[in-house]
Amino acid sequence: YALKHFEIGVDRNDKAFASLIDRMNRIAHPLHGKWMKKWLRRIAHDNGDLLRTDDLKEILENLHAHASVADAPLQVQFRVGGTDSGEIEIDLGTRDGKRVLLVNGEARVINEGSNTLFLRSDSTQPLPIPAETGDWRALFPFLNMTEEHKYLLLSYLTFGLTHPRGTTAYPILIIKGGQGVGKSLLSRSILRALMDNNSAGVQLFPKQIKDMIISSMHQ
């Protein structure tokens, strides 16, 4: 039953995902994740059955076997992705799967028909819907920094929203300043809110590389 409703495959790192075929815009769900397990249990319940832990494990193992022999690896993107025609899409993180397509300097909201496969973490939150008109200079009064640094920050924002992960090296943004100058406010209310809204909030930098990797996997 699941094979009729999902496209199942693995990405370049051999991680298995499932994507509902009839969804207006596609979302990648980790095959062994909470969402997929809940979906399988609900379908079984609707058909008068209850899945025990062993039953669920067996079903997921069978689905993983199907995913492993898929013709081509899935191209799974996170928040910013490239289309087949070389354009850029941004996942707004809304429940209905809205996307923003960047074409020739314009941003178009896409409600359906996108084939770009996006992955979301448990902490992913919606981004604001782009306005029809606007002025990027309106951001500058809220930035407590020099004029030069304002333009550097604007460059960082636009670079992050137009370059999918894995396609190029990412610049590292370093925010410095004394106590009370607004570093956390900048990180949480401007950078997070505009680039990758997330319920995880502002966190201390991990002391160990292992902790940093684990943290990034869940955000």
Image (cartoon, helix red, strand yellow):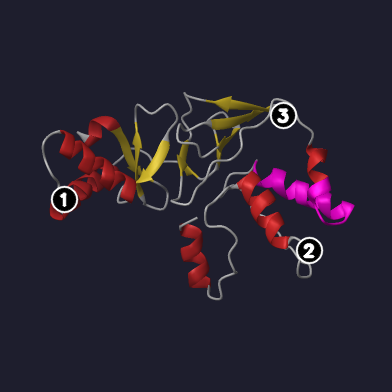
> Image quarter for residue 102?
top right
Q: Would you name the residue on which mark 3 appears?
A: 105
Could you tell me the amino acid type at mark 2? Answer: Val
N-terminal of the pair, mark 1 or mark 2, is: 1
**Whether residue 185 is situated above or below residue 19 in the rendered picture:** below
N-terminal of the pair, mark 2 or mark 3, is: 3
Q: Contact (CB < 8 A) between labels 1 and 2? A: no
Q: Residue at x 63, y 47 (%)?
A: 193
Could you say which is closer to the camera, residue 102 or residue 84? 102
Q: Would you name the residue on which mark 1 appears?
A: 58
Q: Main secondary structure of the magenta part?
A: helix
Q: Is 148 inside the magenta-drawn segment?
A: yes
Can the viewer see residue 73?
no
Q: Is 44 inside the magenta-drawn segment?
A: no
Could you tell me the amino acid type at mark 1? Answer: Glu
Q: Residue furthest left?
A: 48
How far across and how far down the image is residue 33, in percent? 33, 51
User: In what element is the residue under mark 2?
Assistant: loop
Magenta-drawn segment: 141-161
Could you say which is closer to the camera, residue 167 or residue 189? 189
Could you tell me the amino acid type at mark 3? Answer: Gly
Q: Residue at x 11, y 40 (%)?
A: 49
Q: Residue at x 21, y 36 (%)?
A: 43
Quadrant location of the N terminus in the rendered image = top left
Q: Residues within 10 Å of mark 2 (few under 14, many from 20)?
A: few
Q: Would you name the residue on which mark 2 appears?
A: 181
Q: CA distance from mark 2 to mark 3?
A: 34 Å
User: In what element is the residue under mark 1?
Assistant: helix
